[in-house]
Image (spheres, coloured by chain):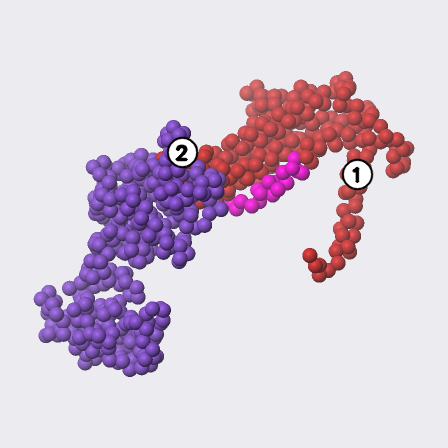
Chain colours: A red, B purple
Amino acid sequence: MTQNFRTWPIALVLGLLSAPIVLMYLYLFLDTVTNSAAGSLIPNEFTLEHWEFLWKTPPGRANIWKVALNTLIFATSTSLVVLTISSMSGYALSRLNVPFRRSLLAGALVLHAFPSVTLLIAIFLVLQMVGLYNTLIGVILVKAALELPFGIWIMKGFYDSVPWEIEMAGIQDGASRFTVWRRLVLPQVRPALLALGLFSFLAGWSEFILPQVLTPGNEVQVLSVYLAGLIADDNNFDMALFKAVGVFYVIPVMILFIFFQKHLMNIFGGGSKG
Amino acid sequence: MRILLENFTKRFGSLTVIDKMNLEVKDGEMLALLGPSGCGKSTTLFAVCGIHRVSGGRILFGDRDVTRIPPQGRNVGVVFQSFALYPHMTVGQNIAFPLEIKKLPKAEIEKRVVEMAELVHIGNLQERRPSELSGGQQQRVALARALVRKPDVLLLDEPLANLDAKLRLEMRSEVRRIQLETGITAILVTHDQVEAMSMCDRIAIMNEGEIIQVDTPVDMYDSPRTEFVAGFLGNPPLTYLRGTRTENGFALANSDLRIPLNRMGNLPAPGSPLSLGIRPENYGPRGDVIIAGRVSFIESQGREMLYDVTLSEGSVLRSIQPVNRDVSLGDKVAWSVVVERILVFGAEGERL
């Protein structure tokens, strides 16, 4: 490939501009496996003591593996609920003659734009009343409900781009409307399902405020709340431990991104017609 | 199986698209629904296959009233304009899909898929996906999928519109061959008169939701019922001379041209307006009555030449002839018309 301008000046400028964040990430990792003398930036010894939380549970704190498992359950279930409901309601709103279709779509959009923090106290009261306070199921349902408007809109946009003829052909071939959806239409929107699944998984993984308020107990704690608990601990605040847990928290996200970034891009490929 | 539409009516909201239409497609026949876009031909087709609900009247397959039966229960095969193959399935899976829905045993499905693939000549493509096929091959797969269930009726919605010109010619005869081999009753929706005439036993020509005429291609071409039908069939289309009836024939308006007519019996009284429809093949060096004019346009079609001749008062007649290099643009010609073949229309466009 011939280039009509030199790239190194651009690379230099961009490199300089992004240096701070690259350095921050570098030190985030470096500080978890090394010790440095006070006031110095150069590490002077390798150590794994900051990762001790993986095999030692300090008194009063939740077990990290239990917390990680909770986070995984929380994110996965949220993602599954969002996928199941959006893939069906998106189809209904795109193709079926639903009464109040336009108002439903507009309502979903409003809900999507609605800041969820404002609902927090109401949700807290409701969960307590129905006995789901401090349970994973409760917070999963709430998180999934808040993610749904986005999911429904995305899925509807993808369904809109599936040609009608495929469904008509399926019906002529003798298949029921449900079979047509499951066997003929759903495979056409597979990229959307994959992307939406990943998005809601990541949204669940990084959610903080809902679990913080709705599942404060040690048994049902998730990683973000665990991490926040470390900052809040004034007595023995440990910066390196905080960083180590942070790295532990972010690794699964990084892995997902590396493997699925192409699919994540897809979500912006499906147009959404009103 | 015979298809019968009785007083078929279709409304979209308050708009009546088709009002009390009657049509019979005979058993084993291939019938073309021909008409300009928006004439209601696709609406009729979708009512027959059950995608559109009928607003009034009845639809019968044989003696079975299917008016209220959902599409899944009608046993109709449809080939869509865009073929509508299932993109995530291979050719074999596409053809097998209707049988899987019927829950036939695996061995039976395999056998029938192979048979069908042989019939439409795609036996070697079963493992491919639709995106890896040419337009003609996709068309064949669509036909196979529509026919594999052994439907009572085959419906074709503009099946050749998405193919390029050469393939269209090939698939025209292929579709007809497959229809004849299976002996299935078929309805072909098209706006292309060449397709309708070359592929079908009979043509039902439609305009604005109404069937104007149902006839064999040859009879419809020779004796169209209205100016609309005459103009729709035949390429290049016929041209008209407009004037009035005289004692023994026709007088062109604003001109002293007189044409004697053969069958005067059913013509209106002298002085009433008449239009003469003249097909390009009936105007040329050989004929009965000379109509002179100046060549105003020449189009070469290879084997034949198309000439537009403008008369002194402004009417234009078209002539199609074997290539004739003696005639060039602007020449005065004194060609004549075959009186026997003139189509006479009244003031309302009705044939007289």
- Name the spot of residue A98 as percent of width and height, x first: 41, 37
- Name the spot of residue A6 as percent of width and height, x first: 75, 58
- Name the spot of residue A45 as percent of width and height, x first: 88, 31
- The chain holding disc 1 is A
In the rendered image, which residue does mark 1 sit on?
Answer: A26
Q: Which of the pair B299/A4 is nearer the observer?
A: B299
In the rendered image, which residue does mark 2 sit on?
Answer: B110
User: From the viewer's perspective, is A22 left or right of B299?
Assistant: right
Q: Which of the pair B64/A252 is nearer the observer?
A: B64
Q: Which stretch is magenta? A: A256-274
- Name the spot of residue B23 as percent of width and height, x first: 22, 47
At label 1, which amino acid type do we have?
Answer: Leu
Snapshot quadrant of residue B248: bottom left
Element type at mark 1: helix
Residue under disc 2 on the same chain as residue under disc 1: no
- The chain holding disc 2 is B
The answer to whether residue A74 is above or below residue A13 is: above
